[in-house]
């Protein structure tokens, strides 16, 4: 395969399809999404078989456990894919929404209209469910999509792509509105991120190394987050029952996700009472604690933490821990080590909670809730294209609105400027 020529053809087809999708009716887009969901359910056995082949090869190649977890599909996760498509179909269509209309002294009315970005390129590793999620969100927001999954999921991604094409065709939309790259050649990524004439934005989903490389080399704007070093802070006024449940869920519900808590902070005034019990709970899940000297004193099984530990996204059964003086010390620690993804405070003190919400500069900030809620589905977005830790255009879980922009519109009745 001539990869450069192939990617040029994909880009040209996407740009042409983007115009059709941008003007497609809400009904046509929803019909396509529902047809995709039906196809996924109908072809569930095919998807599982393709995924089993991917997983077997990945294990043989020594892929790490966190990536295997992300790669693996189950009957339940395939049904979740179908439900995600159906949920996106129920969401309001953002395209064409007019807001902020104001009449000016000249007589004209000025406002904003929400419009698609155009062609969205998405580069992702392992997770084949991203193929369905990305197709759904890009289509509903009026965009064409070029999807480049990792080589470890090539069979499952192509099987899902067939379901997507079936849904588009059933609704009378161009099958090239969502294209899943068929080659595993890494050269394809290099071309995708350097085609501003065909691609309007790149969304990388994967490891820190992948995202850093794409951000460095891209000639197309990138919506990104590098890693998810998320914190839970147990405040002086925390309810210990809530604290235990939140830490347990934030850390142990799944290890290989970017919204898993990687660092635990606890106020010195309650550490003696609460930290040993929390440590026993974590040990019961096989989680290793790496902590400060006070943590090691209260939890003899803990290992001494380094500065690097506090900055690490483990994606596994390890958590860093630090006993801090108060909420100010906790926020200072977060400002130094956080990746600006998600932070949570456990407290019954309203004033402290509001300070934490205002002053912690991360994409998602929570009070008395698990960091695992930092997710497009949980936020009611239907699904997410990714989680952005950027501050411009989109921040946090990126759903339909994050895949659109706004343009100024002016309504007049023959007015001219004097």
Image: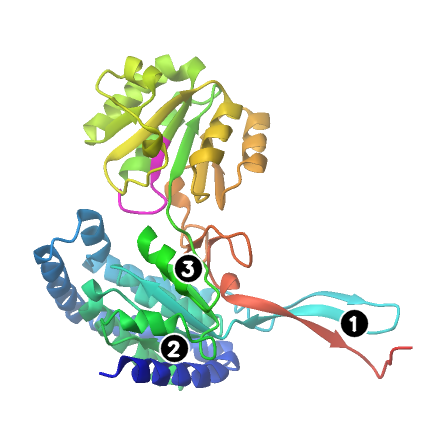
Residue picked out by circle 2? 32
Residue at horizontal 32 percent and vertical 30 percent from the top: 320
Q: Position of residue 48 (x, y in %)?
A: 16, 65
The numbered mark, 3 or 1, whose residue comes first in the sequence reads 1
Q: Position of residue 221 (x, y in %)?
A: 48, 65
For the image, the number of numbered tags is 3
Mark 2 and mark 1: Cα distance apart in space: 36 Å
Q: Which residues are magenta?
A: 255-263
Q: Under tag 1, what secondary structure?
A: strand
Q: Are marks 2 and 3 in contact (CB under 8 Å)?
A: no
Mark 2 and mark 3: Cα distance apart in space: 32 Å
Residue at horizontal 35 percent and vertical 85 percent from the top: 9
Report whether residue 173 is seen: no
Give the residue furthest to the right.
418
Residue picked out by circle 3? 215
Q: Is residue 388 magenta?
A: no
Q: Are marks 2 and 1 in contact (CB under 8 Å)?
A: no
Q: Which mark is residue 109?
A: 1
Q: Position of residue 355 (x, y in %)?
A: 58, 31
Along the viewing direction, whichever of 390 and 275 lies nearer the viewer: 390
Q: Under tag 2, what secondary structure?
A: helix
Q: Quadrant of residue 159?
A: bottom left
């Amino acid at each position: 395969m001539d990869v450069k020529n192939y990617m040029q053809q994909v880009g040209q087809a996407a740009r042409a399809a983007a115009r059709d999708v941008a003007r497609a009716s809400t009904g046509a887009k929803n019909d396509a999404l529902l047809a995709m969901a039906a196809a996924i359910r109908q072809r569930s056995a095919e998807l599982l078989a393709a995924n089993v082949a991917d997983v077997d090869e990945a294990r043989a190649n020594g892929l790490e456990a966190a990536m295997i977890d992300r790669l693996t599909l189950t009957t339940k996760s395939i049904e979740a894919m179908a439900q995600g498509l159906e949920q996106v179909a129920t969401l309001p269509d953002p395209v064409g929404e007019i807001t902020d209309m104001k009449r000016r002294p000249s007589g004209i009315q000025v406002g904003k209209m929400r419009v698609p970005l155009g062609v969205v390129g998405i580069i992702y590793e392992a997770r084949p469910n991203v193929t369905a999620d990305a197709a759904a969100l890009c289509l509903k927001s009026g965009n064409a999509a070029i999807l480049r999954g990792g080589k470890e999921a090539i069979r499952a991604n192509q099987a899902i792509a067939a379901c997507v094409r079936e849904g588009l065709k059933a609704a009378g939309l161009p099958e090239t509105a969502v294209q899943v790259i068929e080659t595993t050649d890494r050269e394809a990524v290099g071309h995708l991120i350097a085609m501003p004439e065909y691609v309007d934005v790149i969304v990388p989903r994967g490891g820190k190394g992948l995202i850093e490389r794409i951000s460095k080399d891209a000639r197309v704007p990138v919506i990104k987050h590098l890693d998810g070093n998320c914190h839970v802070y147990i405040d002086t006024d925390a309810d210990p029952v809530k604290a235990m449940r939140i830490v347990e869920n934030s850390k142990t519900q799944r290890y290989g996700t970017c919204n898993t808590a990687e660092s635990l902070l606890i106020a010195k005034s309650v550490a003696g009472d609460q930290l040993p019990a929390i440590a026993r709970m974590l040990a019961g899940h096989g989680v290793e604690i790496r902590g400060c000297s006070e943590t090691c004193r209260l939890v003899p099984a803990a290992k001494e933490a380094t500065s690097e530990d506090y900055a690490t996204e483990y994606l596994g059964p390890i958590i860093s821990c630090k006993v801090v003086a108060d909420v100010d010390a906790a926020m200072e620690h977060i400002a130094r080590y956080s990746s600006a993804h998600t932070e949570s405070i456990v407290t019954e003190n309203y004033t402290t909670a509001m300070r934490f919400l205002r002053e912690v500069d991360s994409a998602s900030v929570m009070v008395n809730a698990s960091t695992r809620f930092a997710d497009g589905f949980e936020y009611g977005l239907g699904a997410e294209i990714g989680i952005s830790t950027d501050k411009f255009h989109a921040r946090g879980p990126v759903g339909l609105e994050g895949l659109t922009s706004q343009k100024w519109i002016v309504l007049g009745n023959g007015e001219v400027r004097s």
